[in-house]
Amino acid sequence: MRNPEKTQADLMITGDFLLPMDGQDPLNDAGVVVKGDRILAVGKRSDLCSKYESEKILDMPGHLIMPGLINTHTHAAMSLFRGLADDLPLMDWLSHYIFPAEKRIDSRLVDLGTRLACLEMIRTGTTTFKDMYLYEESVAEAAAQMGMRGVVGEVLYDFPSPNYGPPEAGLSYARKMIEKWKGHSLVRVAVEPHSPYTCSPDLLEKANEIAVKERCLLVIHLSETRDEVEQIKQRYGTTPVRHLERLGILGPHLLAVHCVCLDDEEIRILAEHQVKVAHCPESNMKLAAGIAPVPGLLEAGVTVGLGTDGCASNNNLDMFQEMDMAAKLHKVATLDPTVMDAQTTLEMATIRAARALGIEDEVGSLEPGKKADIICLDLNQPHLTPLYHIPSQIVYAASGLDVDTVIINGEIRLQNRCFTQCDPREILREVKKWGERISEEILVPGLNVH
C-alpha cells in the first residue's frame, strides 16, 4: 500500500557512505533516490526514508555510493587487440602488428570489440566513455545496446578510410551520425579529426565548422610525441598547439587528447582558449611518449579529465587503476608528493571529466536533476579497511573489481558483481574465436598460446 504522504520513486540506494562529488563532504549513512533516469534526491538515509517511497530499494551496508566514472578517451573496439605484440617500438608495433590487424576490422568486429569494452567498463565502474575509432556507428549502436553512456565520433583522416572511403566522405559521415543520434538518452556524437599530422588544415577547419554549427565536442590527438611536434614544425613552421591556434580551432568545444609535449606558452594558450585536455598516463608511459605537464595545466586553470586510451596501449579500461597511476606518476615526475592529490585526481575521473566532455550538467556528480549514473563500492575488504579518507582510499587502494553495483541512466546494469541485462559469456566466446584467428594470421613471437 503506497503512502500518499511520501513522494513516489523508482529506486532508492542506501549505504554507509555517499560521495556526491559536488563540492560537498562525504555523507555517512546516506543514499540516492531515483525517478526514471534522473536523481530525485540525495541525503541522509533517515531523511530519504521519511520523504520518499520506492518500488525498489538497494540497501548496501558496508558500501560507498558515488558517481559513475567517466573515461575521456578510448578506442573501445581496440579491446580486440589487447596484448597484441607488446613491448615494441611504436612504429614497429603499429606498422607490423596493429595496422595489419586493423585491416581485418569491419563494422561487425567493431561492434564485438565495443561490447567487450563495455563489459569491462561496466564491471569496473565506468558509466560514460568518449570514443574515437572506425565504424563509429557500430560503436554507438553497441553502447546503446549495452546501456552505456557514450560520446562517440568517427576518426577523420586525409587518406581513405576503410569505413567511409575518401576523406571528403568522412565529414558527411559525421554529419549523418550527428543527425541520427541527436536527442538520444545515452549517445552523443563528437567530430573527431585524428591529429594535426594526419589532417590537412582544410580538413581541420571543416571539422571545426561542423562542431561549432552543431554544438558538438571537437576531439583531436594533440602533441602526443616529440616526433609529432617536430613533424608539424617542419611542415608548418610551428608547434601543433600554435598551428591549431592559427587555424582558429582552439576553443571551449575542443578536447585535446594527450598534450604530452607542451611548453609553458602553449599551456597558457590552451588555458586562454578554454581548451579541455584528456590525460592518458598509462598509455603515454607504455608507448614511452612522455609525461604530460598536468600539474602545470591544472595550475593554469585548464580542465583535465582522465582517459585510458585503447586496450592495445594500456592494456585495460580500469579507471581506478588510471587514477592511481596518474597521481603517483606526477608526484615522482615533479618530486613533489603534494601534486595530484587524491581529491583532484578523483575529480578528473568524475566531475572534471564531465566538464571535459561538456556534459557536466548531466553527469559527474550525484545531484538532484542529474542523470542517475551511480556506482557502489564494496568496502568490506582487507585492502579497504580501515577507512580514514574516502578519496585517498578510492585513488590509492581501490580497484575496479571492488565495484559491486552499477546504475546507468536509472537502469541497474551490474548487481552483486553480476550483469543484469546481458550475458557476458556469449561476447567472450565470440572474442576468443576472433583472437585465435588473429594469432594464426599475424605472426607474433610468443602470442600463440592456444
Image: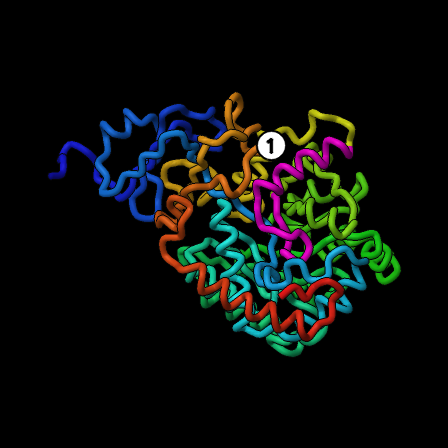
Q: Residues within 10 Å of mark 1 (few under 14, many from 20)?
A: some
In this rendering, the answer to whether 1 lies above or below 116 is above
Q: Position of residue 298 (x, y in %)?
A: 67, 35
Q: Position of residue 185 (x, y in %)?
A: 40, 56
Q: Can residue 167 be seen?
A: no
**Residue 27 shown left or right of residue 394 in the figure:** left
Residue 106 is at least partly visible in this image = yes
Report x, y in % for residue 314.
66, 51
Is 405 within the magenta? no
Magenta highlight range: 306-333
Q: Observer-nearest residue: 90 or 439? A: 439
78 and 262: which is toward the camera = 78
> Is residue 136 placed above or below 11 in the rendered structure?
below
Quadrant of the drawing holding the N terminus: top left
Q: Is residue 6 above or below residue 236?
A: above
Question: Label 1: which residue?
Answer: 396
- Locate residue 243: give its quadrant: bottom right
On screen, residue 46 versus residue 161, left or right, reads left
- 405 vs 215, left or right, is left
- The outermost residue toward the left is 1
Residue furthest to the top in view is: 388
x then y, percent, for residue 37: 34, 48
- Closer to the camera, 229 or 317? 317
In the rendered image, the residue lying farthest to the front is: 450
Q: Nearer the viewer, residue 394 or 155?
A: 394
- Spot the residue most to the bottom: 165
Q: Under tag 1, what secondary structure?
A: helix
Which residue lies at the image location 21% right of the left edge and 36% below the top edge? 53
Taking the spot 42% from the left edge, 46% from the top edge, the residue there is 417
